[in-house]
Amino acid sequence: MGLMDTLKGIKRPGPGVAPVSPDELASKILATNHDDVPYRIERSEKSDLKVDLKIVDAQWYEIFAKANLTKTYSIYLLLDEAVSEVRALERMGEVTWKAGVPTVSFSASGFQGRTIVAKEFGTGFAFKAPHPLSFGKVYEYRFNVKDIKDPLIELITGSGWSYVPVASMRKVRRK
């Protein structure tokens, strides 16, 4: 991998790794969905695939609400078969909680492009029960972009494709 690739955040497959078909790669990426991860990957109308934090998913909703999560994170993925590249656009937005309900916005203060580091974490302690009086941890929350992105990049490059971050939605839009 060259210096320019490194500066641009491009990750290439190892030598001799033949690219799988776009359908096989999409299937592998979609297969990483699990109930125990705080993100969801699905097919997208704007692009080929979209990765989203599970802000409104019932299982994660309570954890995010208690932690007062303030960021949301998405990745749009376009599989370009002609050059065996997955172009990726990352977007971060703001979440506000009104009466325990999340409102997600991508405003001028939002971000899109390539995220190098983004972390949020929190732990909450409270009285859990009045009789007997018990005090303890009620949630523990950790969000790190690398926890979502790194395994995805490893899967893509291990399948013979390059991971190419882009800074514009038009570069990941399906034509």
Image: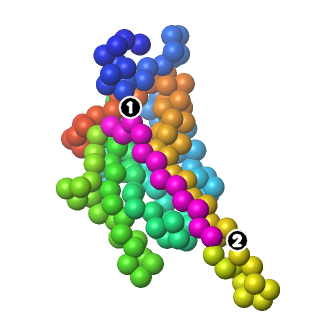
Q: Quadrant of residue 60?
A: bottom right
Q: In the shown orientation, is residue 118 left or right of residue 66?
A: left
Task: Tell me where residue 1 sits by quadrant.
Answer: top left
Where residue 21 appears, x then y in whole percent? 47, 28
Left or right, residue 135 beside residue 107: right
Q: Secondary structure at mark 2?
A: strand
Nearer-the-camera pick, 7 or 133: 133
Q: Spot the residue most to the right.
A: 132
Q: What residue would you read off at disc 2? A: 136
In the depicted view, which residue is nearer to us: 46 or 110? 110
Horizontal side of residue 40 vs 130, given as left or right: left
> Badge 2, how many Cα within 10 Å: few under 14, some, many 20+?
few
Q: Residue at coordinates 32% horizontally, 48% vertically from top-left? A: 91
- Look at the image and give the residue range highlighted in magenta: 114-125
The structure residue drawn at horizontal position 45% and vertical position 63%, both measured from the top left corner, is 69
From the image, tell me which residue sits under label 1: 86
- Residue 159 horizontal/vertical position (percent): 52, 26
Q: Which mark is residue 94?
A: none
Q: Is residue 16 above or below residue 103?
A: above
Task: Identify which amino acid the numbered label 2 is placed on.
Answer: Gly
Mark 1–mark 2 CB contact (< 8 Å): no
Say if the magenta span includes residue 38: no
From the top left corner, tell me how far across and down residue 42 is, in percent.
46, 51
Mark whose residue sits in front, 1 or 2:
2
Pick whichever of labels 1 and 2 is earlier in the sequence.
1
Q: Residue at x 54, y 59 (%)?
A: 122
Residue type at the position of mark 1? Val
Tell me, yes or no, if residue 49 can be seen here. Answer: no
For the point 39% across and 73% down, the residue is: 97
